[in-house]
Image (cartoon, coloured by chain):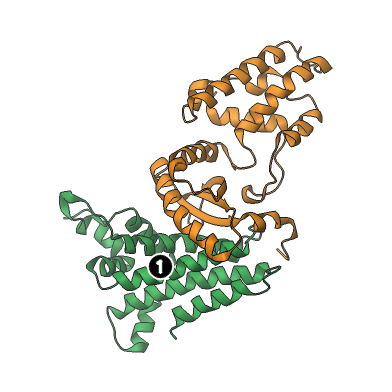
């Protein structure tokens, strides 16, 4: 299996441990694994747009920033594109599958941050199971939408949003 | 006085909010509010509801807004008879307590982390009402900056369904409903929605090794 799928599988396993009294450590790691599953799925897809050789693709994958990806995902989920590639007067509407991926990414990133750093936050088993379930839904949605121009633009925006969002000359 | 000042002023006067985070806060039933109110009389002054303006509550249904206005009016009538720097009499407490208890109850301090969460949360609940799954038994709200300092709205949805598959099915139905409603009501806030089951929520004090 690939790293993203392995991480998703790991999130599933951790969520199911100690069914009567799940440990916070396991639920937190499950939440984190679910986020990183989606993060690595998207960065691998993005890097693959530029390189087929595995080593080069992996090095490219490391250039993606969590913060930029959150910003772009938030914009796309709200039907926003950078100024330079806005489709004129008609406005932009992201395909539902892409919205699901982008929305899940933003939500999971925040939840991952809470899981890793906020010790006052309590995680409950079914709550985390739902995060993992949602991540799986995002994987499926990505599979349906990934060959579209919208999906490729979304990935390209991870690196080019700021440049494309400057006022056109 | 603006609506947040009223919401915060009543909360400060009654001191019902514990240190728990909004999703873990114990339910605040009328008996619990009454116990808190009987612990002192500092809440029985006109200052507690100073500046209340019914128009600030336009986001509530008319009937609820009018009920709140009536409660505040009745409370004020008794509170204005309490001289400054003099404790309220037993009779004044007996008369004012039911009204103030109901005012506190209407403000939903156990389900809303702040005044903005209350304003937005009440609107979201109205918005989803026609399609709300019956298993969605409680919603809790909080606002604040997320980890990148973008404004966020946290929604905790409590589901009365313990079977995992059925729980996920309810969450799948309710998530887009809540997402759409929160983006319509508060487009400037990113909605962070999570689902908990009634049973998991009930076991909160036993949660192991935080």
Q: Residues within 10 Å of mark 1 (few under 14, many from 20)?
A: many
Relative height, residue B166 to residue B64 (above, below): below
User: At 18% from the left edge and 50% from the top edge, which residue is drawn?
Assistant: A90
Relative height, residue A45 to residue B94 (above, below): below
Is residue B141 visible to the viewer in this orientation of the structure? yes
Name the residue nearer the viewer: A114 or B76: B76
Q: Which residue is mark 1?
A: A138
Chain B, colour shown: orange
Q: Quadrant of residue B104?
A: top right
User: At 34% from the left edge and 83% from the top edge, which residue is drawn?
Assistant: A57
Give SS at disc 1: helix
Q: Return the x and y of residue A39 as percentages of the image width and height.
A: 43, 71
| Left or right of A25 on screen, residue A147 | left
Q: Quadrant of residue A124?
A: bottom right
Relative height, residue B69 to residue B13 (above, below): above
Chain A, colour shown: green
């Amino acid at each position: 299996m690939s790293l993203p799928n392995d991480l998703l599988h790991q999130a599933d396993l951790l969520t199911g441990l100690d069914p009567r009294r799940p440990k916070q450590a396991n639920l937190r790691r499950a939440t984190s694994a679910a986020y990183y599953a989606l993060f690595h799925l998207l960065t691998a897809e993005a890097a693959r747009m530029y390189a087929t050789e595995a080593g080069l693709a992996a090095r490219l994958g490391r250039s993606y920033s969590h913060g930029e990806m959150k910003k772009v995902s938030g914009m796309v989920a709200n039907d926003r594109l950078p100024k330079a590639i806005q489709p004129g007067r008609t406005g932009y509407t992201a395909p539902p599958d892409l919205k699901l991926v982008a929305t899940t990414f933003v939500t999971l990133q925040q939840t991952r941050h809470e899981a890793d750093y906020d010790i006052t936050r309590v995680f409950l088993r079914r709550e985390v199971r739902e995060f993992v379930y949602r991540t799986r839904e995002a994987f499926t949605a990505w599979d349906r939408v990934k060959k579209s121009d919208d999906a490729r633009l979304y990935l390209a925006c991870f690196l080019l949003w700021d440049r494309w969002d400057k006022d056109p000359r | 006085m603006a609506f947040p000042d009223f919401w915060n002023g009543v909360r400060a006067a009654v001191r019902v909010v514990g240190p728990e985070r909004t999703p873990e806060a114990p339910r605040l039933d009328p008996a619990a509010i009454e116990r808190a109110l009987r612990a002192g009389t500092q809440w029985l002054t006109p200052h507690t509801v100073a500046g209340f303006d019914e128009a600030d509550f336009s986001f509530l249904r008319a009937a609820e807004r009018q009920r709140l206005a009536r409660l505040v009016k009745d409370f004020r009538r008794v509170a204005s008879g309490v001289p400054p720097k003099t404790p309220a009499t037993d009779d004044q407490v007996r008369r004012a307590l039911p009204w103030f208890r109901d005012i506190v109850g209407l403000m939903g301090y156990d389900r809303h982390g702040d005044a903005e969460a209350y304003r937005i949360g009440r609107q979201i609940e109205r918005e989803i009402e026609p399609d709300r799954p019956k298993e969605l038994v409680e919603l809790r709200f909080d606002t604040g900056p997320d980890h990148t300092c973008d404004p966020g709205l946290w929604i905790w949805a409590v589901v009365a369904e313990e079977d995992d598959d059925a729980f996920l099915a309810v969450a799948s139905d309710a998530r887009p409903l809540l997402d759409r409603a929160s983006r319509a009501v508060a487009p400037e806030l990113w909605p962070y929605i999570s689902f908990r089951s009634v049973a998991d929520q009930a076991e909160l004090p036993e949660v192991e090794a935080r």
